[in-house]
Image (tube, rainbow, N blue to C red):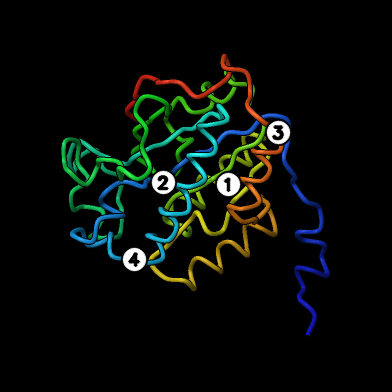
């Protein structure tokens, strides 16, 4: 049976890479990547971390801006009403779970933001950072695909950025949720590609001018 989304023309117009790229990394913090935490036991997320680490090495080598983030709150009183109990474990300011996975973070290079809601764009200074670096294309990586990554994809689209998602650089608690959400955002908001395609595009362009590279940026609490 024909897919009614296809019949209606969803996903027929590719986004494509624009003139200037940036890589954003959503919530690859220990609470989601370290198996000692309830939400850190997904092999699917581990795969995404390893692939993103490779992509980031190439991006930094070519002076592509990189923005990372972690989620944290002062306590229950300033936390929005999450329904997941695991989110309340190790994710308050100063907790170990808020530390970025060492495979991902380069404190001397990356712009880093602290957020309190799903999207890396909401309540942070990410957009001014991207504008400063003349970015028009955002490569979204991180976890989880159905949660904070999806929210970040939608906000990237809403801000008018070309949005590219390397499938193997985002991860979720389960493969099914990952696939279903990528299928949906791929119909509407973003191009779903591979990390190899992103790496090839970065290397094809060569290094951007040093004045436009990622830089250490003041952390901003949402």
User: Residue 189: horizontal and vertical position, in percent?
Assistant: 66, 50
Between disc 1 and disc 3, the foreground one is: 3
Query: What whole-number distance in Å separates the C-alpha atoms at marks 2 and 3?
Result: 32 Å
Where residue 162 sits, quadrant-wise, is: top right
The residue singled out by tag 4 in the image is 42
Q: Residue at x 63, y 46 (%)?
A: 198
The residue singled out by tag 1 in the image is 154
Left or right of 179? Residue 103 is left
Circle number at residue 205: 3
Q: Secondary structure at mark 4?
A: loop
Left or right of 30? Residue 59 is right
Q: Residue at x 28, y 59 (%)?
A: 40
Circle number at residue 118: 2
Mark positioned earlier in the residue sequence (1 or 3): 1
- Compared with residue 36, is residue 91 higher up or lower down, i.e. above or below? above
Query: What whole-number distance in Å separates the C-alpha atoms at marks 1 and 3?
Result: 26 Å
Front-lying residue, 45 or 58: 58
Q: Secondary structure at mark 1?
A: helix
Mark positioned earlier in the residue sequence (2 or 1): 2
Query: What whole-number distance in Å separates the C-alpha atoms at marks 4 and 2?
Result: 19 Å
Query: What whole-number distance in Å separates the C-alpha atoms at marks 2 and 1?
Result: 11 Å
Front-lying residue, 200 or 165: 200
Between disc 1 and disc 4, the foreground one is: 4
């Amino acid at each position: 049976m024909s897919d009614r989304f296809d019949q209606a023309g969803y996903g027929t117009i590719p986004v494509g890479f624009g003139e200037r790229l940036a890589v954003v990394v959503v919530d690859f913090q220990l609470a989601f990547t370290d198996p000692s935490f309830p939400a850190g036991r997904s092999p699917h997320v581990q795969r995404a971390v390893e692939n993103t680490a490779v992509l980031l090495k190439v991006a930094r080598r070519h002076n592509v801006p990189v923005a990372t983030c972690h989620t944290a709150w002062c306590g229950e009183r300033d936390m929005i009403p999450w329904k997941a109990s695991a989110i309340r474990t190790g994710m308050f300011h100063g907790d170990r779970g808020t530390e970025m996975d060492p495979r991902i973070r380069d404190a001397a290079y990356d712009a880093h933001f602290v957020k309190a809601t799903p999207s890396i764009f909401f309540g942070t200074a990410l957009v001014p950072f991207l504008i400063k670096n003349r970015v028009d294309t955002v490569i979204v990586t991180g976890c989880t695909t159905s949660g904070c990554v999806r929210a970040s994809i939608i906000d990237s689209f809403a801000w008018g950025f070309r949005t590219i998602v390397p499938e193997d650089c985002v991860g979720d608690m389960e493969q099914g949720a990952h696939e279903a959400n990528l299928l949906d955002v791929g119909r509407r908001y973003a191009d779903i590609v591979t990390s190899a395609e992103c790496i090839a595009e970065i290397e094809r362009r060569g290094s951007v001018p040093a004045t436009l590279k990622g830089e250490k940026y003041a952390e901003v609490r949402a």
